[in-house]
Image (cartoon, helix red, strand yellow):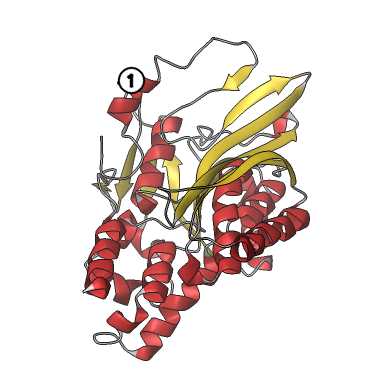
Amino acid sequence: MSDLGKIDRQFFDRRVAPNLGADRDDVAVGPQHGVDFGVLEIGGQALVTATDPISIMPQLGLERAARFALDLVLADVAVSGIPPSHLSICFTLPETMTDEEFATVWETVHEECVDLGVAVVTGHTARYSDPSHPWVGAATAMAVGDPDAIVRPDGARPGDRLLLTTGPAVESVGLLSTLFGDQLEAELSPDVIDDAQERLAEVYCVRDALAAAAAGPVTAMHDVTEGGLAGALNEMADGAGARFSIDREAVPMRPGVRAVCEHLEIDPWAATSSGSLLVAVDPEGIDGVVAALEDRDTVVAEIGRVEPIDEASGGEVLVDGDRLAHPTVDPSWRAYAELADAAND
């Protein structure tokens, strides 16, 4: 397996893909490596579903931590273009979390769900002796809609234009500068740290995904998580069986990101960046999608194009003509571990 957290494609293809339980005709999109969601077709309707762990970091403040955790869960369904509608959620809480603290988390989840039109339909909540922050459970998000309206994860086509919202490493830099700001102050200016910490306001992409899909035509979307932009580009190109040709200078870099990444020796293109979306758009829809995102005050840039590829299967990513590999490790995890160890010392 890779050191990205998620299993790598080789393990998935060898051990997971051949063992997916019963074959059912209602499974329209089943598990695929690098694909955010699955789809069931039931009675003429599509049920889009995705499952993710719940990560709550109390150091962020419980309300902000809960909103962040929920957005991560709902994003994998939102990139289908179908609005999330239902949520099944399981909390495996550490014994140290008080009733009042959990009530804050739960009420925040409720308020966000109300705003997004999402109903909690079932779940499980209990305390256990072994769990610890940040990993305190898991949730399954669902969306019900028209099968023909789904933005397929493998739908990018030659001729499409590629948009990126927000930019690389925003989540990593926002979290590291917020959790370990005191340590970074020795080497980085207060202005840089302030800019970096403000990036946490940009780690939400559910509403961006829905706005882009509504303005389309959008052919594919992928949120930028483990493996960063380099991982997302490779996963989406592989799914499409196409070449993604990227202009490095066109990729937006938010304030504070470059300085923190250089200081911590992080490749921003390989670092997790929840809140960023990679979007493939039919050329006729590019202006409408950009306008819809900019109306939300979301940073968005056209970073490249989808091109045909000669190979029979798979895809590739070229950045200024050079091949971009899928990362095997997310460098933000090493930086987190080193900063945490130093803080404990």
Q: Where is residue 236 in the image (x, y as percent from the top left)?
A: 44, 39
From the viewer's perspective, is 70 left or right of 8? right
* Quarter of the figure with residue 99: bottom right
- Residue that mark 1 sits on: 15
Near-viewer residue (303 or 99): 99
Vertical relation: 98 (above or below) 228: below
The residue drawn where x is 36% and y is 70% is 176
From the viewer's perspective, is 115 left or right of 157? right
Give the secondary structure at mark 1.
helix
Q: Position of residue 38 (x, y in %)?
A: 57, 29
Vertical relation: 151 (above or below) 206: above
Q: In which quarter of the image is the N terminus?
A: top left
The residue positioned farthest toward the bottom in the image shown: 190
Vertical relation: 201 (above or below) 9: below
* Quarter of the figure with residue 170: bottom left
Please, what is the three-letter code of the amino acid marked with disc 1?
Answer: Arg
Q: In which quarter of the image is the C terminus?
A: bottom left
Near-viewer residue (77 or 69): 69
